[in-house]
Image (cartoon, rainbow, N blue to C red):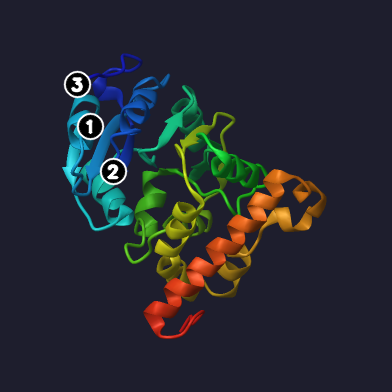
Amino acid sequence: MTSSTALPESDRQVTIVVPTRNSERTIDRCLQSIRGQTLASTVVVVDNGSTDRTRAIAEAGADAVLDMGPERSAQRNHGARSFPAEIVGFVDADMILQPTVVEEVVAALRSGAGSVIVPERTVGSGFWVEVRAFERSFYDGSDAIEAARFFRWDVFDRTGGFDEQLTGPEDWDLSESARQLAPVVRTMAVIEHDEGTISYLDACRKKAYYAEGVRRYLAKRGVAALRQASRRPWLRQPRKLLNWRGAGLIALKAGEALAVAVALGHRYGRPGSWT
């Protein structure tokens, strides 16, 4: 099991929870990036029944590997509550952290912030990954889109943690609760989100999978959440869409919207039903 030497084990005040499920393609780079931080942390992988090499890789690179399901929210809560620390963070298995992320997070939270957003950059290969990266470029600096990933323990605890009834928008939900308790700040260091190679249909299916979670989130948070979820800066900058990536983005959003409508229609008996 590898470990960082930046801080003695006893001085670690940060727990980072990584939920996994069949994540063998990305989990090793993710864990290496956490181990390579300028400040050390306790790394907890919470696996949800992986059938590939995820667990073996995690056991070689994490401080602890736990089991929990059925979804990310429950995995994250279980990892954090099993290893509480002054600061708790949540990193997905397909993310790569720049080396100073944890150092910047600790400085911010010890200076009075309650939660910290780490900006993300989409990486991978293929046309649809380029389209996704193009879309994300419109969200730089937007607290309405980018959610917090690190929290002071007292803030996380007071919110009750992730809502385990939500899958997809649980990050937005927790960030909103944390924002009501203490200031949220951003790091300069970023996270690379490794999407590998994705197809158009895969992207649409993923959105459909999250449709029920989004419906529950909007029902929970009301009109303010609807405004947040529908806020798309690229719609207000049509000139920037006059290129091949813009055309791809419009096609992707149309496909995702249709996939969501179909998914909800199947669940509730008529397309687009939200009741």
The residue at which mark 2 appears reads as: 20
Q: Quadrant of residue 223?
A: bottom right
Q: What's the residue type where badge 2 is placed?
A: Thr
Q: Residue at x 48, y 29 (%)?
A: 101
Proximity of marks 3 and 2: CB atoms separated by less than 8 Å? no
Proximity of marks 1 and 3: CB atoms separated by less than 8 Å? no
Q: What's the residue type where badge 3 is placed?
A: Met
Q: What's the residue type where badge 1 is placed?
A: Ala
| Along the line of sight, the residue nearer the viewer: 74 or 85 | 74
In the picture, the disc for residue 91 is none
Q: Secondary structure at mark 2?
A: strand
Q: Is residue 63 visible?
A: no
- C-alpha span from label 1 to label 2: 9 Å
Residue 259 percent location from the top left of the image:
49, 67
Q: Secondary structure at mark 1?
A: helix
Residue 273 percent location from the top left of the image:
48, 82
Q: Is residue 142 above or below residue 103?
A: below
Q: Secondary structure at mark 3?
A: loop
The residue at which mark 1 appears reads as: 58
Q: Earlier in the sequence, mark 1 or mark 3?
A: 3
Q: Residue at x 46, y 22 (%)?
A: 99
The residue at which mark 3 appears reads as: 1
| Along the line of sight, the residue nearer the viewer: 90 or 248 | 248
Disc 1 crowd rating (10 Å Cα; few below 14, some 14-19, many 20+) is many
